Image (cartoon, grey):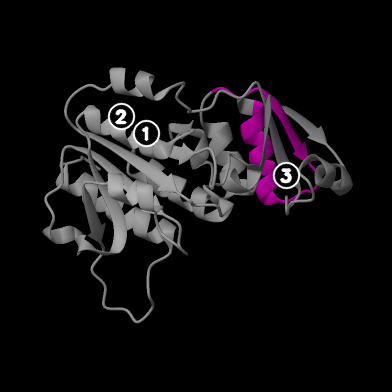
Amino acid sequence: MSEILTGYHAIEERLKGEAVSGVLHLARDNSRIERLAALARRRGVKIRRDSPEALDRLCAAADHRGAVLEVRGVATARRATLEEFVSGLSGERALVLALDGVTDPRNLGAVLRSADQFRVDLVLLPERRAAGATEAVARSSSGASSYVPTLTVTNLTRAIERLKEAGFWTYGADPRGERIDRVELSERLLLVMGSEGSGMSRLVAETCDRLVAIPSGGRVDSLNVSVAAGILLYEARRRQGFAF
């Protein structure tokens, strides 16, 4: 199995992370590309000089800007099962993010970037009605998708119920919900974000213990899902006394 990454920052973060086995394909010469090449040499990653057309074929003509990292034998941050996650919990404080209907890879990448910043313990993704783990997601996350523990589940509602059995309280983001600054938050906290257009599905919303909203004085209906996720994750961690 291999992973294809484009975007200078995403490639740089991946090379800085855990041990990488693969090839850095380069088709240009500039200071940023030479910096990537130097980093690849230090990490023992092969470097191959290719034509721009070869890079186009490698990453389905994405805007690679002359650099593509092909990672082989990918070791992802994904969990095998939800039971594995539950059994591995230590202490009372934990933060899980569930995404219901986030289908735009750019939004998912941006959400994962926030999840990395606020050290989310697990991100749940449904098998259907969701963006998958793609090069566009990795690029939009600036490499964060390599670090954030994620788990794809066949039934999101059932996964939420299992976490509730493990002591999690579930808070669904909804513009009609209570203001987040007036709601008491639990130590084991599951935050659910829906799609920008229709929000959470009815079944998922009904599974939540409470619906919460971000207080706002703007004239636009709602925040972008990735921006809202960042605000709510920060507030959750702040209330949990997380040491940033």
Q: Which amino acid does label 2 sit on?
A: Arg
Which residue: 77% across, 48% down? Answer: 29
Q: What residue type is labelled 3?
A: Ala
Which residue: 26% across, 46% down? Answer: 208
Label 3, label 2: how many angstroms apart (C-alpha)? 42 Å
Q: Quadrant of residue 68?
A: top right
Q: What secondary structure is marked by label 1?
A: helix
* Residue 75 highlighted magenta (yes or no): no
Q: Name the residue under label 1.
A: 158
Contact (Cβ within 8 Å) of mark 3 with mark 1:
no
Disc sitting over residue 67 in the figure: 3
* Residue 24 highlighted magenta (yes or no): yes
Picture layout, residue 20 above or below residue 106: above
Q: What residue type is labelled 1?
A: Arg
Q: Mark 2 points at which residue?
A: 162
Residue range of the region highlighted in magenta in the rendering: 19-41
Q: Is residue 88 visible?
A: no
Q: Relative to the observer, which residue lies in front, 58 or 157?
A: 157
Contact (Cβ within 8 Å) of mark 3 with mark 2:
no
